[in-house]
């Protein structure tokens, strides 16, 4: 018997890995989370950014999945009111789409499948008279409105990692697991620091493989693929972002002739997000990119439903992600289940679980189940806890009231900056604002509303190393930042990273 370095090693810092690390650390386990890139650098920053039941999954009779997702939606609304917020979705209807009775039935189920406390129920709307009809094509005379939630997917991942660390976990980014070897009652986990090139091994009593699209890759590298290990089905989905193309905070869900649906969603104040496509994918998921055909499909989907028109020239940003779906053998990617499977590697003496599939929305429940399962395999106790606890910065009852108190406390902060801080950090904004009396107290201004105080916070607490981490994952400031700002930020990051590290090492007396 060897004393392991950790109770649990989690592979992958997407939403599932971060959620699992948080859950396990909260049960008192010593946890190591390793992420080969930056946190949320793969699928978990490339989603449609909805915390939703998934209305369309009802068509595939996925009642269990929809119920679970709707329950999680309520839990996340409570746990992170700054990061998960309600949004109305307009479903315009015309001939040739799914029949009205079917939509009414679907919405009735959606309203009632799980306890709905915070969101309004669905209703029919007369789009000739209602303001929601103003942006869309005149042929739509009737429609429905229902509620779901929008989130910031990449920041949701970081909040989970942060909470994991505050509960005692260790998180190493830019660190890949290169091999797993079961050695009696524990796992030898080989790691490589991809920035420094160092390699070393750690021992962990349990392993959870949450490498998303690479879940099989991790197993293959360690000769752990044997009969019974599920297959993963890789499905690429892409989005385009265009300058805001209609007024109002409502999103639209547009049915396509090919039976798919496309979301059109207000995004980052000044933009509209349009997605998603769905294509089977082969190759390394990190190379997934939107194709010209996908851009054209999404523009056409918008143009067919809205009065305004967008062209490929309007696209200011696009992104693609790869869903690691559990392969249920369905031919059609759209019909493949968005549920998840937690595969127990039963033939090993030391517990190990691999995660197949899932949704952003269900990550907390998935994490809870995965940790409970691993503990059962190890014959160890540990009660579930995460449903009733806020995520960092989420200790807020009413987000609007919270923002009013912050606006009174920091009257000198421009409204849009305060709003961004509130949505991104919730109560944690105090960590870098407290004591500041004017914008000057936030240190150097790199441009476009990016101040030193925030960047120091991101480097110290949120694993930021590269400028991309800030521009495209900790925030979407990449949509706004001018080249000069990016240069300033890059230069400052080099110095700040050294300074923060040196300062923190001094603080802990190393
Ligand atoms: C287009 C699209 C739209 C979506 N929209 C929604 C939505 O609106 N709502 C919703 O609920 N769900 C949505 N989803 C689903 C959701 O995004 C995914 O289910 C979820 O992000 C998967 O998270 P994950 O942690 O399993 O994988 P990932 O986020 O991919 O994380 C896996 C991580 O493992 C790391 N890794 C891989 N190999 C190693 C290794 N050897 N060592 C260390 N680290 C490693 C990777 O770098 C990666 O960061 C969408 C998915 C797509 C593709």
Image: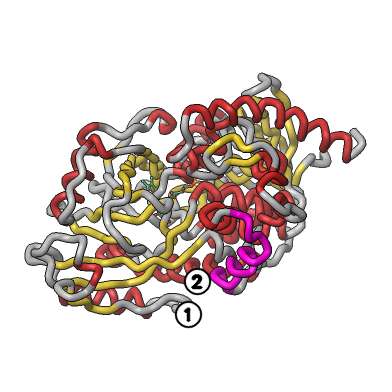
Q: Secondary structure at mark 1?
A: loop
Q: Which mark is residue 485?
A: none
Residue at figure coordinates x 8%, y 63% from the top left: 96
* Residue 410 painted magenta: yes
Q: Which residue is mark 2?
A: 74
Residue at figure coordinates x 56%, y 45% from the top left: 345
Q: Which residue is mark 1?
A: 117
Residue at figure coordinates x 17%, y 56% from the top left: 306
* Disc 1: CA contacts within 10 A as few (<14), some (14-19) or many (>=20): few
**The quarter of the displayed image where residue 507 is located:** top right
Looking at the picture, how far across and down is residue 75, in whole percent?
Answer: 54, 69
Q: Is the magenta region chiefly helix, strand or loop?
A: helix
Q: Is residue 435 above or below residue 473?
A: below
Looking at the picture, how far across and down is residue 175, in whole percent?
Answer: 64, 31
Q: Quadrant of the N terminus?
A: top right
Mark 1 Cβ inside 8 Å of ligand 1: no
Residue at figure coordinates x 51%, y 54% from the top left: 416
Measure the C-alpha gap from mark 2 to mark 1: 7 Å
Which residue sits furthest right? 509
Left or right: residue 137 versus residue 509 is: left
75 vs 479, nearest the viewer: 479
48 vs 179, nearest the viewer: 48
Q: Secondary structure at mark 2?
A: helix
| Boundaries of the magenta span | 398-413
Whether residue 371 is visible? no
Left or right: residue 143 versus residue 338 is: left
**The quarter of the displayed image where residue 176 is located:** top right
Marks 2 & 1, CB-CB < 8 Å contact: yes
Looking at the picture, how far across and down is residue 436, in whole percent?
Answer: 73, 52
Circle count = 2
């Amino acid at each position: 018997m060897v004393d392991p370095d950790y109770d649990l090693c989690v592979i992958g810092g997407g939403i599932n890995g971060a959620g699992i690390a948080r859950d396990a650390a909260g049960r008192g386990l010593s946890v190591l989370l390793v992420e080969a890139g930056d946190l949320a650098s793969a699928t978990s920053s490339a989603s449609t950014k909805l915390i939703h039941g998934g209305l369309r999954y009802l068509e595939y009779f996925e009642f269990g999945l929809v119920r679970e997702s709707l329950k999680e939606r309520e839990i996340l609304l409570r746990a992170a009111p700054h990061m998960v917020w309600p949004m109305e979705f307009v479903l315009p209807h015309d001939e040739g789409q799914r029949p009205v009775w079917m939509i009414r039935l679907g919405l009735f189920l959606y309203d009632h499948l799980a306890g709905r406390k915070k969101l309004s129920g669905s209703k029919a709307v007369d789009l000739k008279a209602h303001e929601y009809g103003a942006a869309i094509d005149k042929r739509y005379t009737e429609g429905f409105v229902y509620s779901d939630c929008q989130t910031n997917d990449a920041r949701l991942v970081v909040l989970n990692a942060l909470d994991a660390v505050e509960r005692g976990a260790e998180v190493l980014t830019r660190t890949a697991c290169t091999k797993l070897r079961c050695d009696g009652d524990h796992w030898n986990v080989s790691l490589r620091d991809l920035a420094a090139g160092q390699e070393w091994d750690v021992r962990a009593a349990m392993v959870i493989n949450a490498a998303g699209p690479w879940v099989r890759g991790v197993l293959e590298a360690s000769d752990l693929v044997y009969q019974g290990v599920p297959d993963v089905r890789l499905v690429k989905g892409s989005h385009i972002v265009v300058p805001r193309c209609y007024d109002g905070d409502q999103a639209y869900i547009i049915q396509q002739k090919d039976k798919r649906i496309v979301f059109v969603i207000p995004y980052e104040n000044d933009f509209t997000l349009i997605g998603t496509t769905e294509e089977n994918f082969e190759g390394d998921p990190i190379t997934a990119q939107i194709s010209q055909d996908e851009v054209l499909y999404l523009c056409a989907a918008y143009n067919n439903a809205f009065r305004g028109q967008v062209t490929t020239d309007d696209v200011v940003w696009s992104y693609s992600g790869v869903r690691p779906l559990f392969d249920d053998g369905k031919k059609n990617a759209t019909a493949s289940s968005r549920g998840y499977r937690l595969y127990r590697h039963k033939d090993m003496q030391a517990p190990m679980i691999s995660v197949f599939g899932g949704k952003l929305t269900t990550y907390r429940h998935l994490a809870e189940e995965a940790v409970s399962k691993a503990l059962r395999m190890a014959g160890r106790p540990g009660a579930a806890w995460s449903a009733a606890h806020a995520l960092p910065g989420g200790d807020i009852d009413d987000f609007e009231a919270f923002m009013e108190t912050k606006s009174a406390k920091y009257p000198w902060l421009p409204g849009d900056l305060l709003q961004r801080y509130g949505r991104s950090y919730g109560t944690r904004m105090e960590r870098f604002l407290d004591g500041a009396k004017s914008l000057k107290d936030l240190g150097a201004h790199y441009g476009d509303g990016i101040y030193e105080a925030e960047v120091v916070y991101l480097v110290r607490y949120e694993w930021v190393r590269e400028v991309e981490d800030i521009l495209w994952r900790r925030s979407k400031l990449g949509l706004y930042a001018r080249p000069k700002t990016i240069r300033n930020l890059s230069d400052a990051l080099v110095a700040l990273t050294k300074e923060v590290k040196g300062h923190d090492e001094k603080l802990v007396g190393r």
